[in-house]
Structure formats: C-alpha cells, structure tokens
C-alpha cells in the first residue's frame, strides 16, 4: 500500500470498524473519511491523529500502514538504523508530509556508510527526495 487513504482503510478494517463507526467515534463526517480513503482528499495532520487515536494506534503506524496489533513488517525490523533515519521516522508530521512508501523506507534503511559518519535527518529527507526525483520518467 502506498497511498495514505489505503493505509487508513487497511487500519480501519483491521480494527474491525466500518467507516460509519470510525467517523462517529472520531467525530468527523463519514463522507470526508470516504474521500480520504479513496484518495480524493488529502488528510490533515489533525485528521490523521484523530484516525490513529480512534483506531488505537500511533500516527507513525498509520503512516507506514501498520494496523492495530500487527507486527512491524519485516523490512522495518532487524539491524540498527542510523540515528538520522530514526529521527525522521519518529517525526510524525514529516512522515505524513513525505508519506514514504514501505519500499522507500526499505531503501533508506539499506543505506550503508562508514560508521564514523552519522547522517542527519536532513540527509535522509534529501536522499528520499533525490530518489523520487531520479525515479521519475524523463
């Protein structure tokens, strides 16, 4: 899943909630929830925070498509990450703005360099943007 709407739908369904139930629980219009899930409207950070709270998960879990009670996907487990990447993944607003796909996070995690170099969060943001720019067909 790469779209935030798909991630919201997946998390909602994993939690066993209908659109109507979740909308009522978080006090938003069901039509707006539907628009977001179908990719016809972009959610605000406040909306994402409400959805995550209503489902019972953290915003960052919602941002990467992890539902309630689900383990982290294998690609997010294992060896240690650079501190800059950890900071990026923990920055809720940055994650929602950039909306990285699981593939993009895998790519960022696979970056290896001399252990004496500690790349910053900005390094990983720029690496993601550069990856996206170079992936575009010309």
Image: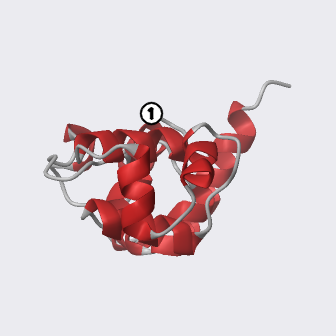
Residue at x-position 30% and y-position 39%: 13
Horizontal and vertical percent position of residue 111 = 41, 49
Is 68 in front, or is 113? 68
- Badge 1: how crowded within 10 Å, few (<14), some, or many (20+)? few
Q: In the picture, which quadrant includes the N terminus?
A: top left
Horizontal and vertical percent position of residue 92 = 46, 72
Task: Using residue 53 as the reference point, say whether residue 103 is left or right of it.
Answer: right
Is 31 in front, or is 3? 31
Residue at x-position 43% and y-position 46%: 19
Tell me the SS state at disc 1: loop
Horizontal and vertical percent position of residue 131 = 63, 43
Task: Using residue 80 as the reference point, say whether residue 106 is left or right of it.
Answer: right
Task: Using residue 122 as the reference point, say whether residue 137 is left or right of it.
Answer: right
Task: Using residue 13 as the reference point, say whether residue 130 is left or right of it.
Answer: right
The image shows residue 62, relative to residue 73, as above or below, that is: below
Residue at x-position 44% and y-position 50%: 108
| Count of marks overlaid on the render | 1
Residue 111 in sight here: no
Is 84 in front, or is 27? 27
Is 101 in front, or is 54? 54
Name of the residue lying farthest toward the right: 138
Q: Which residue is mark 1?
A: 1
Q: In the picture, which quadrant includes the C terminus?
A: top right
Residue 22 in sight here: yes
């Amino acid at each position: 899943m790469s779209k935030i709407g798909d991630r919201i739908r997946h998390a909602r369904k994993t939690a066993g909630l209908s659109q109507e139930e979740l909308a009522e629980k978080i006090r938003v219009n069901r039509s707006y929830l539907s628009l977001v899930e179908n990719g016809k409207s972009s959610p605000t950070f406040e909306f994402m925070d409400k959805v995550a709270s209503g489902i019972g998960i953290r915003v960052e879990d919602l941002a990467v498509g992890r539902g309630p009670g689900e383990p982290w996907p294998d690609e997010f487990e294992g060896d240690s990450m650079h501190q800059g990447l950890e900071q990026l993944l923990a920055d809720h607003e940055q994650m929602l703005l950039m909306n990285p796909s699981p593939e993009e996070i895998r790519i960022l995690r696979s970056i290896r360099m001399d252990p004496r170099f500690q790349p910053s969060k900005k390094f990983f943001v720029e690496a993601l943007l550069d990856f996206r720019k170079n992936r575009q067909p010309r």
